Amino acid sequence: MKKSFLTIAAAAALTTGLSNVSLAQTSAVTNAILNQRQGLYDKARTDIDKAVLHEKTSGKAKTWYTRGEIYEQMMDSPIFGKQLQPGEGTQKAFESYSKAIELDGKTGEFGKQAAGKMDNLYARAFNDGVNNYNAKDFDKAITSYKLASQIRPADTTVVLYSAYASEAKQDIPAAKASYNQLIGMGYKSPSMFIRLLQIARQEKNEAEAAKVLKAALEAYPTNKTFLIEDLNMSMSSGSGGDALAKINKAIEADPNNSNLYAVRGSLFDQQKKTDLAQKDYQKAIELDPTNFDAQFNLGVYNFNRGIDMMNKARKMDLKTYQSSGKKMEAEGKKIVEQSIPYFEQAMKVQPEDRVLLISLQKAYINVGRTADAERINAKLESMGK
């Protein structure tokens, strides 16, 4: 009987001990909440970090939600925030709220509250990334952007900013990975495709460049830059006819697109089909007077034609010059004058383009408009000629 009694007593003691452990862990959450309410975030952190590791409380959404709140409040505190490593608070809060949602669902008491906290965490992570980028701490910026991306997986902005940060630290493979991630997310941007093309060219990877260009043209079928790249690629591979077929097909699909005619005009220029080139440039201007390339190229065409005539006349001997050269020089001057309105229109579109300004200055000089030439020269000097 004594043995039986002792066994029962031992069992009772063991049960009591287990109950006390359970209560101790539950009280750790309670103590964390009490310290949190009193602003004692260091003590609250110690209590809650223990609670999330214990089997009795680690499976409770309340535990993890409370932990997320404590780390958020520590970040806001000028005193306790110093106890956290850079980015630690946001990371721990995100992990905690994510776990609360996992355990409670987005409709449960704590899961719903945790889901509501995510927007604030995203803003924190994103702003940390921007601030670190501006401070040129690109590694920390990338870490923050990646956390923001975890919080909002469908957000393309942070992935793009991460690519910028990788480029800033000259980590081209990482930047390339971010750009490709954006493509996988359905993000479209001409500048992104242009950068990927540049990277492919730097790596001398023509197969990759062709792949990027294909994706770029699928996204922007009438983009002038991509069309020209495609045409140049076709020309360099010896398939000029294929290039012309591509641009003709594009024009058939979009006959009112000024850029397409300007691009085809450039192609005709390369093929020395001057008349066809001029016709396309004129059509491009008819559709869009602000088409820089068409205006500039027509200016160049008339300038070169006029200068050629003037130079031929100036090289004649005196007798020939007096009989026919003088007339030829005057005709050449008139043709150079015809280039000026095209150059001037192009300058309205791109007033800082150096090649254009120098071309216009030469045209002014050759037709005797000295004051206008000096004005252009002053502009070039102010730009650091």
Image (cartoon, grey):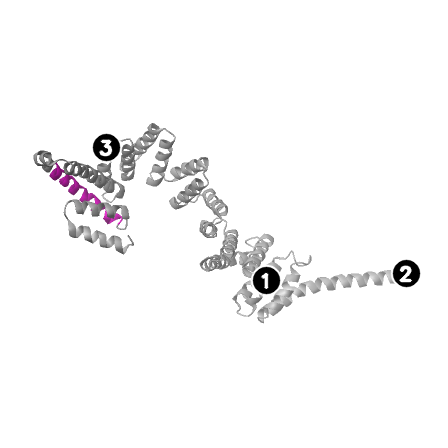
Q: Which residue is drawn at 48% across and 57% down?
A: 129
CA distance for labels 2 and 3: 115 Å
* Mark 3: amino acid: Thr
- In magenta, the rendered stretch is 328-350
Q: Residue at x 9, y 35 (%)?
A: 319
Mark in the foreground, 1 or 2:
1
As displayed, is residue 136 above or below residue 332?
Answer: below
Residue 72 lies in the magenta stretch: no
Please give the label number shown on residue 302: none
Q: What element carries label 2?
A: helix
Q: In which quarter of the image is residue 272?
A: top left
Q: Residue beneath label 3, please?
A: 274
**Which residue is at the front of the view, 6 or 191?**
191
Question: Horizontal and vertical percent for residue 106?
Answer: 55, 53
Please give the label number shown on residue 3: 2
Question: Horizontal and vertical percent for residue 270?
Answer: 29, 33
Question: Horizontal and vertical percent for residue 80?
Answer: 56, 68
Of the image marks 3 and 1, the number of the one nearer the N terminus: 1
Contact (Cβ within 8 Å) of mark 2 with mark 3 = no
- Residue 277 falls left or right of residue 203: left
As displayed, is residue 262 above or below residue 350?
Answer: above
CA distance for labels 1 and 2: 47 Å
Q: Residue beneath label 1, please?
A: 66
Of the image marks 1 and 2, the number of the one nearer the N terminus: 2
